[in-house]
């Protein structure tokens, strides 16, 4: 893992201002408004990540090219964050639904096998009877999701 990824706060405000093309005072204003929240050092100095720099550039673009005021930009950014969070929740819900569908399929297969045994007069639990047909993909998917 790269110790200096896009989220690592490493740039002091003067460097962040230069990289974003904004004045340091503008970065302070954006921080106070909650548009960009840089990391902080033990002495409370701001440290910006590359993701923060990209966000600063996007704020500048929305303001200058699209003519959106800072309040509107803040609302847009909040909606974007909500959208990302909701997409992550939806992906988790889809995964849980898939797991439940696989479990239901397996349960139905067991029920069908037991019904077949009863129709043919076989006693429950016949030695060697394969009561639980398991799809290999279901087991692999379940294991991969639950092994973290």
Image (cartoon, rainbow, N blue to C red):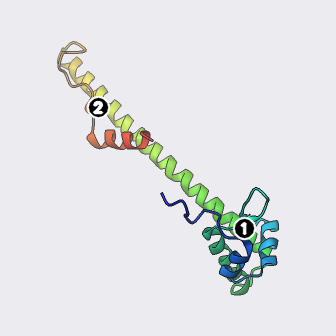
x, y percentage for residue 93? 51, 47
100 sits to left or right of 107: right
- Quarter of the picture holding the C terminus: top left
| Label 1 element class | loop
x, y percentage for residue 62? 69, 80
Q: How many marks?
A: 2
6 sits to left or right of 52: left
x, y percentage for residue 58? 65, 77
Which numbered tag is attached to residue 71?
Answer: none
Q: Quick check: can you spot residue 59?
A: no
12 sits to left or right of 96: right
Specify the quadrant of the image occupied by residue 97: top left
Q: Nearer the viewer, residue 58 or 72?
A: 58
Residues under numbered marks 2 and 1 in contact, where contact means CB atoms less than 8 Å apart: no
| Label 2 element class | helix
Which residue matches tag 2? 109
> Is residue 128 positioned above or below 46 on the image?
above
- Quick one: label 2, few (<14), some, or many (20+) residues within 10 Å? some
- Quick one: label 1, few (<14), some, or many (20+) residues within 10 Å? many
Query: Which residue is at 41% across, 44% downward?
Result: 98
x, y percentage for residue 137? 29, 44
Which residue matches tag 1? 36
Q: Nearer the viewer, residue 101 or 52?
A: 52
Q: Which callout, 2 or 1, points to the residue nearer the camera?
A: 1
Q: Quick check: can you spot residue 11?
A: yes
Query: Which residue is at 57% across, 66% downward?
Result: 6
> Is residue 141 positioned above or below 75 on the image?
above
- Looking at this view, name the residue that lies furthest to the front: 43
Specify the quadrant of the image occupied by residue 128: top left
């Amino acid at each position: 893992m790269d110790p200096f990824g896009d989220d690592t706060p490493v740039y002091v405000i003067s460097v962040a201002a230069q990289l974003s093309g904004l004045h340091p005072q503008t970065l302070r204003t954006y921080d106070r408004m909650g548009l960009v929240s840089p990391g902080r050092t033990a002495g409370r100095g701001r440290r910006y990540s590359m993701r923060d720099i990209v966000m600063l550039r996007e704020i500048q673009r929305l303001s200058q090219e699209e003519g959106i005021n800072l309040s509107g930009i803040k609302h847009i950014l909040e909606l974007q964050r909500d959208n990302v969070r909701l997409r992550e929740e939806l992906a988790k819900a889809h995964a849980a639904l898939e797991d439940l569908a696989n479990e239901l399929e397996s349960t139905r297969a067991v029920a069908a096998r037991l019904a077949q045994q009863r129709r043919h007069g076989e006693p429950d639990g016949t030695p060697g009877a394969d009561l639980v047909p398991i799809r290999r993909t279901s087991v692999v998917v379940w294991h991969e999701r639950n092994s973290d």
